[in-house]
Image (cartoon, rainbow, N blue to C red):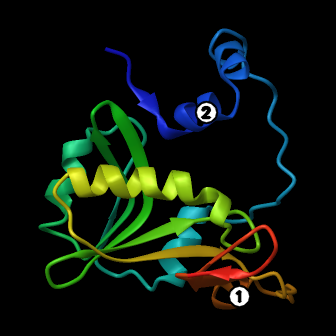
C-alpha cells in the first residue's frame, strides 16, 4: 500500500495531470524568496514559549507522537497517520483533557484557502483519538519591520481567525 502525504492529495485535487507528472519526473530546483535566519521550528518554540517539549523528526513512526502526549506538554513537528494519510502538525499543546493545535503559515495572513489542509490534519488527529480544544495559526506579521535583532514575538502573530480572499475575517 502506498502512503501519501497531504501535499500529494492537495496536488491531485488541484490538477491530476500535474500530480502525475510530479510523481514521475525529477524534482525541480527550489528557489526560496524568504530568507530564514532561523528555522521555523525554533521560531515556534520561542514564540509559543515552550519549555517542556519534544521535537518530531522526518520519517518517525506516527505512534510515537501519541506516546509523547503522556510525557510532554508540547510536541513540535508531530507526525500522525490515519488510513494511509500522513500529516505533520507544527505544534500540539496538551491542556487538561484535550489539545490545542498550532499550524504554521509562511504567509502574512491565515487564509481560508488552507482550510482543506487544516481540516484534513484535524480529521487525522481526531481519528487518532485526540480531543481538539482550540486551533490556531502562527503567521508573519505584515506590519513587522526588522530592526537590529529579530523580534520573534513581533515578527509572528497567532490567530484563530481566517481571512477570505476578499480580506474579510471568517471565524
Which of the two discs, 1 and 2, labels the residue nearer the N terminus? 2
Residue for badge 1: 151
The picture quadrant where one finds residue 147 is: bottom right
Q: How many marks?
A: 2
- Location of the N terminus (image quadrant): top left
Image point 65% across, 14% down: which residue?
20
The residue mark sitting in front, 1 or 2, is 2
Residue 114 point in image, percent of width and height: 61, 58
As drawn, the label of residue 13 is 2
Q: Is residue 71 above or below residue 23?
A: below
SS class of the residue under badge 2? helix
Does 116 appear above or below 103?
above
From the top left corner, tell me how far across and down residue 26 is, in percent: 73, 13
Residue 37, percent across and down? 74, 65
Q: Is residue 34 left or right of residue 162?
A: right
Residue at point 32% right, 30% down? 84
Amino acid at each position: 500500500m502506498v502512503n501519501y502525504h497531504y501535499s500529494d492529495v492537495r496536488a491531485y485535487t488541484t490538477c491530476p495531470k500535474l500530480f502525475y507528472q510530479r510523481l514521475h519526473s525529477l524534482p525541480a530546483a527550489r528557489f526560496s524568496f524568504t530568507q530564514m535566519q532561523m528555522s521555523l521550528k525554533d521560531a515556534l518554540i520561542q514564540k509559543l514559549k515552550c519549555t517542556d517539549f519534544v521535537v518530531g523528526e522526518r520519517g518517525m513512526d506516527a505512534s510515537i507522537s501519541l506516546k509523547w502526549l503522556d510525557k510532554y506538554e508540547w510536541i513540535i513537528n508531530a507526525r500522525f497517520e490515519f488510513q494511509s494519510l500522513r500529516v505533520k502538525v507544527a505544534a500540539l499543546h496538551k491542556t487538561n483533557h484535550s489539545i490545542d493545535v498550532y499550524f504554521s503559515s509562511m504567509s502574512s495572513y491565515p487564509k481560508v484557502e488552507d482550510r482543506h489542509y487544516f481540516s484534513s490534519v484535524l480529521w487525522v488527529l481526531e481519528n487518532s483519538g485526540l480531543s481538539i480544544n482550540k486551533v490556531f495559526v502562527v503567521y508573519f506579521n505584515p506590519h513587522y519591520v526588522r530592526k537590529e535583532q529579530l523580534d520573534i514575538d513581533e515578527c509572528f502573530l497567532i490567530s484563530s481567525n481566517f481571512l477570505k480572499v476578499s480580506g474579510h475575517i471568517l471565524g
